[in-house]
């Protein structure tokens, strides 16, 4: 089954404790991206990657890091989490964007709480 | 960042009624997608429209892309409780390297 898998689904952590949210896709998509979803603000892009070893900042990259060492994996790293990073996070993948008809496949989300 | 304005933000109607959700922008998009998101899950793609004036139907859902490719609408006929969810419109610009532009969504509740 074609899918984007995120782990964990739920995470509660303390301020300053480094964490990684994993994302893996099995569709051989070039493009992967991370979003956070907050009430009243909708989905906002954190980072995206057009291909292996190619990453770029989205709209809200502060406090986050990513890497794309393999095509299928795109982990999101919070080096020193803070309470304002409490949110619902989604990973998504697609064939290259801006090509019209391709949709995006989203993971099921990771609900992160930083206390 | 280009904006996509969705209206209404919230809509609660009775089962069997019809409704329309709108998505508007001042920018031109090469394609526009509609997603439905259920609580605790990721958005799921419903449809992609790419041609100005295009109309696509998915059972009781009708999607239209504006002639100028700046706006779109989603019409649901005879809404059912299973239609409840957050509906997102998402625009993609031709050759854009930064992915997508998201509307904030329409929260739809269909009451039995």
Image (spheres, coloured by chain):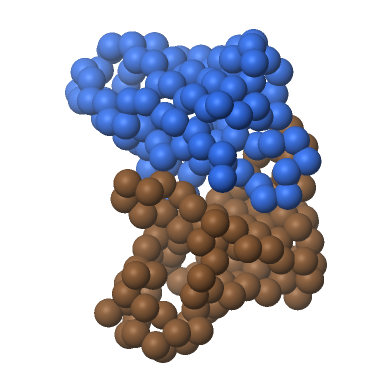
Above or below, A30 against A6 in this view is above
Residue shown at the point (39%, 11%) measured from the top left:
B77
Above or below, A5 against B103 in this view is below
Residue B46 makes an appearance in the image: no
Residue B101 on image: x %, y %: 56, 41
Residue shown at the point (43%, 64%) measured from the top left:
A110
Q: Is A98 on the left or on the right of B59, as rendered? A: right
Colour assigned to chain B in the rendering is blue
Q: Is A70 on the left or on the right of A107, as rendered? A: right
**Nearer the observer, A1 or B86:** B86
Q: In what quadrant of the picture does the C terminus of chain B appear?
A: top left
Residue shown at the point (67%, 50%) measured from the top left:
B98
Residue A43 makes an appearance in the image: yes
**Nearer the observer, A86 or B83:** A86
Q: Quadrant of residue A75?
A: bottom right
Q: In what quadrant of the picture does the N terminus of chain B appear?
A: top right
Above or below, B26 against A29 in this view is above
Residue A46 on image: x %, y %: 55, 61
Q: Is B36 on the left or on the right of A34, as rendered? A: left
Residue B110 on image: x %, y %: 26, 25
Q: Is A67 on the left or on the right of B58, as rendered? A: right
């Amino acid at each position: 089954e074609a899918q984007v898998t995120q782990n964990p689904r739920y995470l509660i952590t303390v301020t300053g404790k480094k964490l990684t949210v994993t994302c893996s896709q099995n569709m051989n998509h070039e493009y992967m991206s991370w979003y956070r979803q907050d009430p009243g603000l909708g989905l906002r892009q954190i980072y995206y990657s057009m291909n292996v070893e190619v990453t770029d900042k989205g709209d809200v990259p502060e406090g986050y890091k990513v890497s794309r060492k393999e095509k299928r994996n795109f982990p999101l790293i919070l080096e020193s989490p803070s309470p304002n990073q409490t949110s619902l996070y989604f990973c998504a993948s697609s064939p290259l964007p801006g090509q019209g008809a391709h949709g995006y496949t989203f993971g099921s989300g990771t609900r992160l709480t930083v206390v | 960042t280009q904006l996509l304005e969705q209206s209404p933000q919230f809509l609660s109607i009775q089962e069997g009624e019809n409704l329309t959700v709108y998505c508007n922008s001042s920018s031109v998009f090469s394609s526009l997608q509609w997603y439905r998101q259920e609580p605790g899950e990721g958005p799921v793609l419903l449809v992609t429209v790419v041609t100005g004036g295009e109309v696509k139907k998915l059972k009781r859902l009708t999607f239209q892309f504006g002639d100028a490719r700046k706006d779109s609408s989603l019409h649901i006929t005879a809404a059912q409780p299973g239609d409840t969810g957050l509906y997102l419109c998402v625009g993609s610009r031709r050759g854009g390297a930064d992915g997508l532009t998201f509307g904030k969504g329409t929260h739809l509740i269909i009451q039995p």
